[in-house]
């Protein structure tokens, strides 16, 4: 249902763009987002875009460095990452939440019902 790609090995300060292709049924009008999980750490919310609105939610750790966007024509959600830091090293997962979920709930992993397989981002210092 969700296929993430674009991860890789980069140096600190570099940029990277992740993509996540979804089926129209999964993607249509639902909120989309990204989570990440580093080895030995808990899963962490990264960013979310509320339905097709211009409302966004970002984790404080990535705000002003990462941008989430979606292309409805391509059923694809992106995560543009700039000024990458070694602390950004993790497996990144794209997610979608049902249309019924409200903006204030989007930091909660439990509201997302579809998860992609993850793409690894490694940032060297």
Image (cartoon, grey):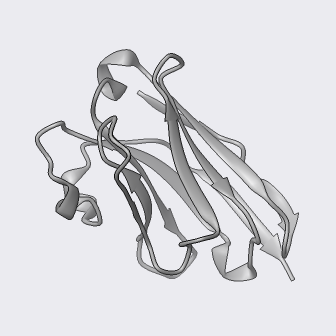
Q: Quadrant of the N terminus?
A: top left
Give percent across and percent down for residue 106: 26, 59
Please tell me which residue lies in front, 96 or 62.
62
Please tell me which residue lies in front, 58 or 10.
58
Q: Residue at x 21, y 56 (%)?
A: 103
Please tell me which residue lies in front, 75 or 90.
75
Give percent across and percent down for residue 23: 41, 19
Total numbered badges shown on the rendered structure: 0
Left or right of 51: which side holds 103?
A: left
Give percent across and percent down for residue 2: 46, 32
Q: Residue at x 85, y 65 (%)?
A: 14
Left or right of 50: which side holds 103?
A: left
Q: Quadrant of the C terminus?
A: bottom right
**Vertical placement of residue 70 versus 93, above or below:** above
Left or right of 66: which side holds 13?
A: right
Question: Residue extending furthest left?
Answer: 100
Q: Residue at x 15, y 52 (%)?
A: 102
**Vertical placement of residue 103 versus 1, above or below:** below
Q: Residue at x 34, y 52 (%)?
A: 55
**Vertical placement of residue 123 versus 99, above or below:** below
Residue 11 in which image quadrant: bottom right
């Amino acid at each position: 249902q969700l296929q993430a790609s674009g991860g890789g090995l980069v140096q600190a300060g570099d940029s990277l763009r992740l993509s996540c292709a979804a089926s129209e049924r999964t993607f249509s009008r639902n909120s989309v987002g990204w989570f990440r999980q580093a080895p030995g750490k808990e899963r962490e919310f990264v960013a979310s875009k509320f339905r097709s609105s211009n409302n966004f939610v970002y984790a404080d750790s990535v705000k002003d460095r990462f941008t989430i966007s979606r292309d409805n024509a391509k059923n694809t959600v992106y995560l543009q990452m700039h000024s990458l830091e070694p602390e950004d090293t993790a497996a990144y997962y794209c997610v979608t939440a049902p249309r019924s979920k409200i903006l204030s709930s989007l930091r909660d992993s439990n509201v997302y019902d579809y998860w992609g397989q993850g793409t690894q981002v490694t940032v060297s210092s």
